[in-house]
Image (tube, rainbow, N blue to C red):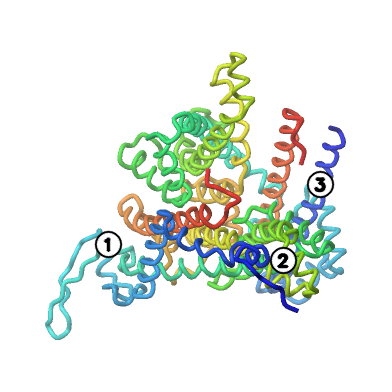
């Protein structure tokens, strides 16, 4: 069965606002927050991919000869064949003589992987649960009670507990950070579904006999996309921050993997004399989280018409 | 009103039940046998079996849950694997520093943030307003420990005004206690200042456009009285938001304060599951209770509010 569509306007009413709104991306790209945030994030992504060619050395290489070097200090290294090269520690070296600059650059990889994976995992699980909960009354009753309970547990404590149970490796850490974020997505999707299901285009779909799963995927899901992207961006930022906190506390990703949190954790002992080991990764965490949050703020203002930043 | 209060009180029960189930299952889903973990590496099979029956681990899982909950309600949260002490006693020893830190932080944050937010709203779009908004975004993004170390570096290492780390009990010397808490609470307050100032500003801007504000002003009520009443109320909610607890854990770790946050980290490193369980339970319980009290207080002061 086909539906006659005679004008742009009725098409919008039938398939929802986002699908036909071509102006959306133009509006998004005109937002200064989105542009600045996106540029910084892109630079970070490039930095993570190009880490080996950015003048870095092996981030795990221990060299006792260069312990605790200050940022910018350089040394002439004489190789076995007598050739001399100058080695500069842009951000100094840590207590084991590892190059902090290389470690920070490689640390970008872990932070971005954690942020993006957590956002994707919690968003897709939240979407699936939220769609079903928003449509089936009895599922809704049970699921929302469980979500209320989960939300009462402080997210970071739940993550800490899950890391303790699952073990401190990259995969479990990502999952542990993702689980406490799921209820927020479920609530968001559910509330959107409750509004969208009353829209004329969904009623029309029901009237022409479209099966429920198809309605959810084809008509309801695309309309949750805007708010979902916004929420996912904020989750990504907070995941990067939480990963850094867990690693800093020594209960996150194993210490042999260079992450920003781990670098800072190792810098704690000699912080009074060599504050740079905490300062540089700290700046990177702050700039990354700031950029992702700016992106999120900008996207919210343009994609999510229900809320405006205060 | 009574119906509302009763409903609100009852609504807490399913939430706490879910929290209890999640926390309980977390331990049960642990890889490995908790009895073997307690007994240690050199224990014989009989010793492990003895511990298992003592802990009730040989019972069906539903029975175990009921036993665990009924014990927890009586304040018996089990015994720590690592500290070889009852978890309740352990938490009792560690709660004072955490409460001290939390209270001084909230007071400090409100004292700084509310006037800032109100001023920013008052001069909406001005220099202070824009600085504050910039600062508040920064406050969300900079990790707490970076702020902490920065403050230590400036105020303790460079100018020697304040101690680097440590905690003094309030019963020993009040002055010393306060002196050691200045930097930690400033550190932790930084996140809240950002958050509360932003919320205050938003709610004040909102409120100033309301008809009843015009009425209040027309009545001759001072602008300040109108502002403070609404600003303060709206500042109460973000204070208890969840990020704060992560902040407490980190701040205690940075400043070497022997509170619940440090206990959490120690417990995770030692895989001390009963302690982890108890801490999660305690914080969730506190969170639910504080939310409940705020809701009830709101509806008491503003009868229109019903949840």
* Residue lying farthest to the top in this orientation: B220
The residue tagged 1 is A92
Residue at the image position 53 percent from the left and 28 percent from the top: B174
Residue at the image position 59 percent from the left and 56 percent from the top: A156
Q: Secondary structure at mark 3?
A: helix
The residue tagged 3 is B11
Left/right of residue B119 with respect to residue B95 in the rendered view = left
Q: In the image, which is nearer the foreground, mark 3 or mark 2? A: 2
User: Residue A138 falls in which quadrant of the image?
Assistant: bottom right
Q: Secondary structure at mark 2?
A: helix
Q: Residues within 10 Å of mark 2 (few under 14, many from 20)?
A: many
**Distance in Å between CA atoms under marks 2 and 1:** 51 Å
Q: From this view, report whether residue B208 is shown above or below residue A226.
A: above
User: Residue A46 falls in which quadrant of the image?
Assistant: bottom left
Q: Residues within 10 Å of mark 1 (few under 14, many from 20)?
A: many
Q: In the image, which is nearer the foreground, mark 3 or mark 1? A: 3
The residue tagged 2 is A131
* Residue lying farthest to the front in this orientation: A6
Where is residue A116 shown, x and y percent of the image?
A: 51, 68
Where is residue A273 shown, x and y percent of the image?
A: 30, 52
Pointer 2 indicates a residue of which chain? Answer: A
């Amino acid at each position: 069965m086909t539906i006659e569509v005679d004008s742009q306007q009725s098409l919008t009413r039938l398939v929802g606002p986002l699908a036909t709104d071509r102006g959306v991306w133009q509006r998004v790209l005109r937002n200064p927050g989105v542009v600045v945030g996106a540029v910084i994030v892109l630079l970070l992504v490039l930095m993570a991919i190009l880490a080996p060619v950015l003048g870095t050395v092996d981030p795990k290489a221990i060299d006792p000869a260069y312990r605790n070097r200050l940022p910018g200090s350089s040394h002439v290294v004489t190789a076995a064949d007598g050739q001399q090269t100058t080695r500069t520690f842009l951000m100094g070296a840590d207590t084991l003589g590892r190059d902090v600059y290389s470690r920070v650059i490689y640390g970008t990889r872990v932070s971005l992987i954690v942020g993006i994976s957590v956002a994707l995992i919690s968003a897709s699980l939240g979407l699936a649960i939220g769609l079903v909960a928003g449509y089936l009354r009895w599922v809704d009753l049970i699921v929302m009670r469980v979500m209320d309970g989960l939300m009462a547990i402080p997210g970071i404590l739940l993550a800490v507990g899950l890391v303790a149970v699952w073990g401190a490796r990259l995969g479990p850490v990502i999952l542990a950070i993702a689980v406490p974020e799921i209820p927020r997505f479920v609530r968001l999707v559910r509330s959107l579904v409750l509004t969208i299901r009353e829209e004329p285009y969904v009623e029309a779909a029901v009237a022409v006999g479209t099966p429920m799963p198809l309605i959810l995927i084809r008509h309801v899901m695309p309309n949750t996309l805007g708010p979902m992207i916004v929420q996912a961006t904020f989750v990504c930022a907070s995941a990067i921050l939480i990963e850094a906190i867990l690693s800093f506390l020594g209960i996150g990703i194993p210490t042999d993997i260079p992450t920003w949190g781990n670098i800072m954790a190792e810098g704690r002992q000699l912080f009074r004399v060599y504050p740079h080991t905490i300062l540089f990764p700290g700046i990177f965490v702050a700039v990354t989280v700031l950029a992702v949050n700016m992106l999120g703020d900008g996207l919210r203002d343009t994609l999510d018409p229900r809320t405006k930043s205060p | 009103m009574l119906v509302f209060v009763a409903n609100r009180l009852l609504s807490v029960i399913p939430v706490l039940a879910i929290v209890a189930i999640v926390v309980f299952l977390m331990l049960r889903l642990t890889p490995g046998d908790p009895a073997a973990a307690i007994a240690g590496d050199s224990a014989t099979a009989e010793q492990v079996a003895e511990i298992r029956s003592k802990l009730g681990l040989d019972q069906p899982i539903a029975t175990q849950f009921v036993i665990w909950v009924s014990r927890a309600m009586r304040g018996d949260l089990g015994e720590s694997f690592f500290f070889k002490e009852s978890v309740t006693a352990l938490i009792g020893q560690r709660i004072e520093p955490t409460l001290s830190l939390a209270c001084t932080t909230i007071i400090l944050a409100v004292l700084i943030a509310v006037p800032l937010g109100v001023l920013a709203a008052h001069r909406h779009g001005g220099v202070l307003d824009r600085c504050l908004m910039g600062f508040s975004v920064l406050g969300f993004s900079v990790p707490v420990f970076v702020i902490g170390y920065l403050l230590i570096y400036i105020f303790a290492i460079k100018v020697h005004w304040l101690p680097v780390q440590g905690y003094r009990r309030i019963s020993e010397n009040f002055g010393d206690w306060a002196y050691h808490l200045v930097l930690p609470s400033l550190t932790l307050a930084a996140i809240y200042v950002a958050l509360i100032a932003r919320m205050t500003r938003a709610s004040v801007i909102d409120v100033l456009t309301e008809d009843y504000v015009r009425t209040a002003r027309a009545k001759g009520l001072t602008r300040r009285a109108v502002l403070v009443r609404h600003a303060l109320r709206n500042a109460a909610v973000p204070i208890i938001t969840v990020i704060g607890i992560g902040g407490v854990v980190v701040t205690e770790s940075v400043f070497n304060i022997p509170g619940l946050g440090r206990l959490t980290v120690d417990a995770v490193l030692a895989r001390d599951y009963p302690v982890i369980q108890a801490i999660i339970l305690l914080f969730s319980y506190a969170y639910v209770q504080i939310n409940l009290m705020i809701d009830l207080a709101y509806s008491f002061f503003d009868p229109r509010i019903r949840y």
